[in-house]
């Protein structure tokens, strides 16, 4: 685990032993984002044993025995030990914003955007982390109809770990997607431009003369170059240079301008324009 002062592999058995004692409410009142991170901090010696209000004095005594530390009173900065309370959502006022779903550490709230949300009371740990994000204050505390025990703590641990694993998978997938979008084209910007041109085949009228055909094609190429410029800039110049990229439409001749010295256009340009 990052940030620990010793090898995480050596701490793992101790972390597991500590985590087995914690209530698994995942309320973050200890100052850590869950029971397992708090267990890791306890194993590393960077957290005190009296930071868990749901565990109360009983937990402090068990942690003191396991870690061979002196007992301490519950730190009031982290709250006080109270009876377990779950949460319920007021169906009439829920707007379906999904903020409570995102806040729940054990996926105990179900619903869809702009649809009413429901709390799975049997899975709720009473962490109450869903209450502050609610923009319409439609979540309230209700007395728990059961006593929190080791069996419920075990199920809460499994749901917490499953959610953490799911969020990690989603984060990796999103990172891979963004990385693929930002990756340079295998053959560079010029090849990207060629792909753009292939995807936008110019439509040339059948009756068009050679000069008109060349003008139409050059305009399509210019549009492709203009699309390639932002991509090349985003890649930090790694994709190579784009011909005439610094001068918009520099390669598009005006077919009806008078001939200039060195003009590569056919000699019958003016005739085509006139006719």
Image: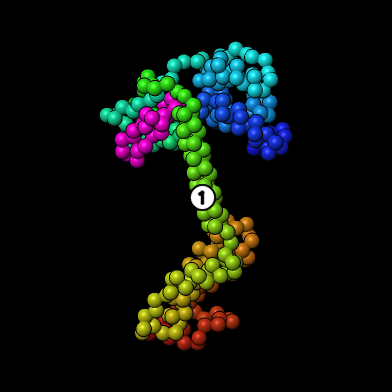
Q: Residue at x 54, y 67 (%)?
A: 192
**Residue 16: x %, y % from top left:** 60, 32
Indicate yes or no whether the magenta region holds residue 129: yes
- Quadrant of the frame with the N terminus: top right
Q: Residue at x 55, y 16 (%)?
A: 58
Indicate yes or no whether the magenta region holds residue 235: no
On screen, residue 273 above or below 170: below
Q: How many circles with numbers are drawn on the protein?
A: 1
On screen, residue 223 above or below 175: below
Q: Nearer the viewer, residue 199 or 186?
A: 186
On screen, residue 243 above or below 159: below
Q: Residue farthest to the top?
A: 73
Q: Which residue is mark 1?
A: 174
Q: Which residues are magenta?
A: 108-132
- For label 1, the crowd category at 10 Å Cα-Cα, with few meaning under 14, some 14 to 19 and many 20 or more, is few
Q: Residue at x 49, y 44 (%)?
A: 166
In this rendering, does residue 229 appear at all? yes
Q: Nearer the viewer, residue 59 or 265?
A: 59
Q: Main secondary structure of the magenta part?
A: loop
Q: Label 1's element?
A: helix
Q: Residue farthest to the front?
A: 151
Q: Nearer the viewer, residue 142 or 224?
A: 142
**Residue 120: x %, y % from top left:** 37, 32
Query: In the figure, residue 4 lies in which quadrant?
Result: top right
- Quadrant of the frame with the C terminus: bottom left
């Amino acid at each position: 685990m990052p940030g620990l002062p010793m090898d995480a592999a050596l701490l793992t058995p101790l972390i597991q032993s500590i985590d087995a004692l914690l209530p698994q409410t995942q309320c973050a009142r200890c100052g850590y984002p869950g029971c397992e991170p708090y267990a890791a901090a306890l194993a590393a010696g960077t957290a005190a044993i009296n930071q868990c209000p749901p565990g109360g004095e009983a937990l402090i005594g068990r942690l003191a025995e396991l870690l061979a530390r002196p007992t301490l009173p519950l730190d009031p900065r982290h709250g006080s030990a109270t009876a377990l309370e779950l949460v319920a959502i007021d169906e009439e006022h829920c707007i379906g914003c999904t903020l409570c779903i995102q806040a729940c550490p054990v996926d105990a709230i179900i619903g869809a955007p702009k649809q009413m949300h429901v709390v799975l009371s049997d899975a709720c740990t009473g962490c109450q982390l869903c209450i502050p994000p609610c923009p319409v204050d439609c979540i309230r505390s209700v007395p728990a109809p059961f006593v929190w025990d080791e069996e419920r703590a075990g199920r809460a641990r499994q749901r917490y770990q499953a959610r953490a694993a799911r969020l990690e998978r989603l984060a990796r997938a999103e990172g891979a997607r963004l990385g693929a979008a930002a990756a340079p084209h295998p053959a560079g910007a010029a090849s990207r431009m060629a792909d753009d041109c292939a995807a936008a085949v110019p439509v040339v009228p059948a009756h068009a003369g050679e000069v008109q055909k060349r003008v139409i094609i050059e305009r399509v190429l210019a549009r492709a170059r203009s699309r390639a410029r932002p991509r090349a800039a985003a890649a930090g110049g790694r994709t190579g240079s784009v011909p005439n990229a610094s001068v918009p439409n520099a390669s598009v001749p005006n077919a009806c301008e008078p001939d200039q010295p060195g003009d590569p256009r056919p000699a019958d340009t003016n005739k085509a324009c006139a006719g």
